[in-house]
Image: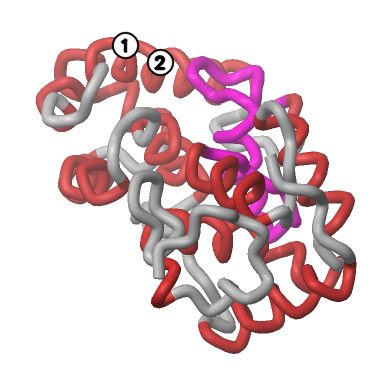
Amino acid sequence: MAKQLPYKTIREIFRRFREAEPEPKGELEHVNAYTLVVAVALSAQATDAGVNKATRTLFQIADTPEKMLALGEEGLIEHIKTIGLFRQKAKNVIKLSRILVEEYDGEVPNSRAALQSLSGVGRKTANVVLNMWWRYPAQAVDTHIFRVGNRTGIAPGKDVVAVERAIEDNVPADFALHAHHWLILHGRYICVARKPKCGACIIRDLCQYEEKTL
């Protein structure tokens, strides 16, 4: 695990990220808060591209919890059977839709605790929804962000909660809203797991990773 980088270095890293991509976007397609919750729940152990392919027609038919309940579990499975763990995910989506209708008047709540009360929605999913829909500077830590945080020294931590806390504590406030997306895109396309593309990395001179591939 790398040492925590100093404030000035982190500012420069995020300045470069912002210069390269001023408004980074999540890659999951959605039309409202509800479809975003469903898309993120479906994306566990699956690619965003695979989820998007499955949900394009699904969200034309079921873009509210009421419509999803009308579609039913078997109807939902027909749309998402190309996604890993589709049976369990279908159960969760139907269950979370029922909770939304019965407890939240069909509206997606916007507190982390309330979001986590929904079936299949963990802390990471809740943070993605808070960040992408309500533009709250929540930091959803996935495998990409965990890797980048620890390799670079931007946010070292032994587990995802420690990395999440390190991002919140160390990333300057003016970069906090987009920090999650800059880090995830960097991990997905540049700082990849097996052979990081250090030669194409815009922060390689500031990164503490000792096994750089140049």
Classed neighbour count for the residue bearing mark 2: other residues with Cα under 10 Å, few (<14), some (14–19), many (≥20): many
Q: Where's the N terminus, which quadrant?
A: top right
Disc 1 residue type?
Gln
Is disc 1 in contact with disc 2, using a CB cutoff of under 8 Å?
Answer: yes
Classed neighbour count for the residue bearing mark 1: other residues with Cα under 10 Å, few (<14), some (14–19), many (≥20): few
Residue that mark 1 sits on: 88
Q: Is residue 118 among the parts visible in the rendering?
A: yes
Position of residue 50 relative to residue 22, above or below, is above
Q: Where's the C terminus, which quadrant?
A: bottom left
Q: Position of residue 189 (x, y in %)?
A: 37, 62
> Is residue 211 located in the magenta-colored stretch of the structure?
no
Residue 92's label in the rendered image is 2
Mark 1: which secondary structure? helix
Q: Nearer the viewer, residue 7 or 63?
A: 7
Q: Position of residue 181 (x, y in %)?
A: 55, 60
Position of residue 79 relative to residue 35, above or below, is above
In the drawing, does residue 104 fall left or right of residue 77?
right
Q: Quadrant of residue 83?
A: top left
Spatial distance from mark 1 to mark 2, Cα to Cα? 6 Å
In the drawing, does residue 53 fall left or right of residue 101?
left
In the drawing, does residue 46 fall left or right of residue 140?
left
In the drawing, does residue 37 fall left or right of residue 174?
left
Q: Residue at x 17, y 48 (%)?
A: 53
Q: Residue at x 25, y 49 (%)?
A: 52
Q: Nearer the viewer, residue 89 or 17?
A: 17
Disc 2 residue type?
Asn
Q: Residue at x 35, y 31 (%)?
A: 42
Q: Position of residue 35 (x, y in %)?
A: 41, 43
Instruction: State the extent of the magenta-drawn residues as a range.
Output: 114-142
Q: Residue at x 38, y 65 (%)?
A: 197
